[in-house]
Amino acid sequence: MTIAARETTGATGPTPEESSSKVRITLEVNGKTCTGWAEPRMTLADFLRDELGFTGTHLGCEHGVCGACTVLLDGHSVRSCLMFAVQAAGHSVVTVEGMASEDGELHPIQRAFSEKHGLQCGFCTPGFLMSTSELLEQNRKPTEQEVREYLSGNLCRCTGYQNIVEAVLYASELMTYRRPSDGGTGGAGASDAGEEQ
């Protein structure tokens, strides 16, 4: 049963099909408090996808190698296939669904990947977007080599990486020229008067 279904029915505990071994987990996902039930062995990736409905988090290798399941936990990238859901209780998680603004305007990183064709099949894209978000939070103007090194933990079998690298560099430009008052969703061309030099 999904969270939306629980909120609709007013259910407060496990449904009959949920075993007594499940625990209640409350965490913040994309700025909203979410609660669900999971067995202690359930991964964060499965919890996000199957219990909470955030299917933008993809599962590839399930060994922490491909990076498709990357999310931000308290602002830091983690492989959600390697982390138990119970470990995330009380923490803040951002998934790819949390990048765009509520009115649907794409985040500059998403826009850059679209405009620079930094994706093909799109399966690995959520992981790349989340890793890029962390990179550009730490380093607003990375070099091409820094981008390649930072994203080396994310695998793509389609693009050959060149367009992904170009997209990240372009996203860096878009984010540099956003006004601080844009709150993270402003477009290119805005003044960067408030930026640190």
Image (cartoon, rainbow, N blue to C red):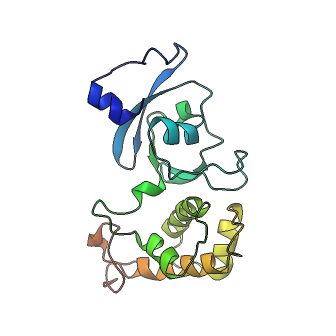
Q: Is residue 149 above or below residue 163?
A: above
Q: Residue at x 50, y 41 (%)?
A: 48
Tell me if residue 73 comes above or below residue 124 in the rendering: above
Q: Residue at x 70, y 45 (%)?
A: 62
| Residue 197 seen in the figure | no
**Can the viewer see residue 41?**
yes
104 and 72: which is toward the camera: 104
User: Where does residue 187 sit, x and y in percent of width and height?
Assistant: 34, 78
Q: How many marks?
A: 0
* 80 relative to 23 in the view: left or right: right
Q: Position of residue 165 (x, y in %)?
A: 62, 78
* Observer-nearest of 45 and 28: 45
Indicate the position of residue 122 as horizontal and vertical percent values. Answer: 58, 65
Please identify the quarter of the rendering in which residue 6 is found.
top left
Q: Which is more toward the observer, 184 or 53?
A: 53
Q: Residue at x 53, y 82 (%)?
A: 116
**Location of residue 13 in the rendering, given as x and y in whole percent from the top left corner:** 38, 18
